[in-house]
Image (cartoon, rainbow, N blue to C red):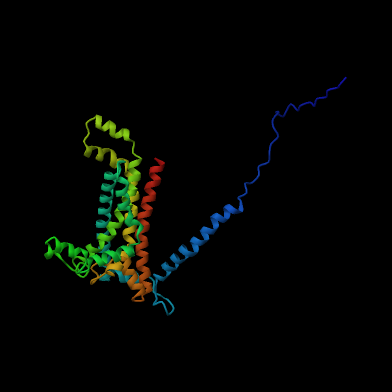
């Protein structure tokens, strides 16, 4: 006969599963490597040179002798620098024309090419193709077109408009606008892709309901398309402003900021001051001004994005 023995339970304790000790989660070394290595590379190649740039903006340095600390002397000089004032005004005008036209034309191209129809892929690719080319190569092609015996003047002469032929890049009145065209030609395709992605995310039922209510195309665009593209508009605005502030390649390749600073931007003035006039301290101060302007745009966009995410 088997004898069954049972342990008497303690009345003060409740039966349950034995507790497991919490073990600290250990991050795998591979994960740490994937995080730390890019962070160290970013700090070495980006943050450290940026800090050096801030310091150099407070010095007078020709790139050969030792930098001499002058405090805010470079920034005080900007107040009386007429070329700096011209560069600021040209940068603002570049932002308005380059930004406004690229946004408007990019949105228009996206609206025309959003429908899936025969041959639409070819036109999308044709508009996006200039984005693939480097700005320097684009500028060289347009420079050949702008020559006195180039394609543009030959076309005008062939159409019987010989009186309109012009040395486009050598005239102070036309150099700035001639430089904008190549940059705009390249930017429209990029903005078009951003808006195409936003248009694909709009619910088609909204347009069907608007049609049933008798809304015109303009009313649909105003009350449905634009509000639905608000987040895309914020991205496009940020990209355009940042691209405007760092525009350099196309301007330098075509005019180098001339003639007589008529197409001078902050970026080209910074480069010519630092590496041609060998005033690296003043050029660093100009770079700090560009950084502050770009950072202000990025910060305002991030604040708005976080507010929309919390709401």
Residue 234 position, x and y percent, is 33, 48
Instruction: Check the image and report above or below for 238 versus 228.
Output: below
Tell which residue pokes out farthest to the right in this image: 1
Position of 106 with respect to 45 (left or right) is left
Task: Give residue 279's quadrant in the image.
Answer: bottom left
Using the rendered view, name the quadrant where residue 87 is placed.
Answer: bottom left
Task: Indicate the position of residue 198 as horizontal and vertical percent values.
Answer: 34, 44
Total label count? 0
Left or right of 22, for residue 76: left
Q: Quadrant of the N terminus?
A: top right
The residue lying toward the viewer, choosing from 126 and 243, is: 126
Q: Residue at x 31, y 72 (%)?
A: 77
The residue at 70%/34% (across/down) is 18
Q: Tell me if residue 122 can be seen.
A: yes
Q: Nearer the viewer, residue 288 or 196?
A: 196
At x 25%, y 67%, the residue is 144
Which residue appears at 28% of the width and 32% of the height? 208
- Residue 84 sits above or below residue 94 on the image: below
Q: Mark yes or no: residue 248 visible.
A: no
Spot the residue most to the top: 1
Q: Is residue 86 above or below residue 18?
A: below
Residue 311's spot in the image, x, y percent?
A: 39, 40
Asked where in the image residue 310 lies, by quadrant, the reply is top left
| Residue 13 percent coordinates (x, y) | 72, 29
């Amino acid at each position: 006969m088997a004898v069954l023995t049972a342990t008497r339970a303690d009345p003060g304790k409740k039966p349950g599963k034995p507790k497991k000790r919490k073990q600290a989660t250990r991050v795998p070394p591979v994960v740490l490597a994937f995080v730390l290595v890019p962070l160290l590379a970013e700090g070495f190649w980006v943050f450290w040179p940026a800090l050096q740039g801030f310091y150099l903006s407070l010095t007078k340095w020709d790139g050969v002798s030792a930098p001499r600390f002058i405090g805010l002397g470079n920034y005080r000089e900007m107040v009386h620098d007429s070329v700096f004032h011209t560069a600021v005004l040209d940068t603002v005008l570049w932002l308005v024309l380059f930004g406004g036209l690229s946004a408007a034309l990019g949105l228009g191209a996206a609206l025309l090419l959003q429908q899936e129809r025969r041959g639409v892929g070819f036109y999308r690719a044709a508009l996006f193709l200039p984005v693939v080319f480097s700005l320097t190569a684009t500028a060289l092609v347009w420079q050949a077109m702008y020559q006195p015996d180039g394609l543009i003047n030959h076309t005008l002469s062939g159409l019987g408009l010989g009186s309109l032929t012009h040395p486009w890049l050598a005239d102070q009145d036309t150099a700035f606008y001639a430089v904008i065209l190549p940059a705009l030609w390249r930017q429209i395709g990029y903005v078009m892709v951003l808006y195409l992605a936003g248009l694909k995310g709009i619910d088609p039922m909204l347009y069907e309901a608007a049609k049933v209510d008798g809304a015109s195309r303009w009313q649909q665009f105003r009350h449905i398309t634009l509000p639905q593209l608000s987040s895309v508009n914020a991205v496009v605005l940020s990209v355009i402003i940042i691209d405007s502030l760092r525009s350099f390649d196309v301007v330098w390749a075509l005019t180098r900021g001339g003639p007589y600073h008529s197409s001078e931007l902050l970026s080209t003035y910074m480069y010519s001051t630092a590496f041609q006039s060998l005033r690296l301290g003043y050029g660093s101060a100009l770079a700090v001004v560009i950084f502050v302007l770009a950072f202000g745009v990025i910060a305002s966009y991030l604040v708005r994005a976080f507010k929309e995410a919390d709401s």
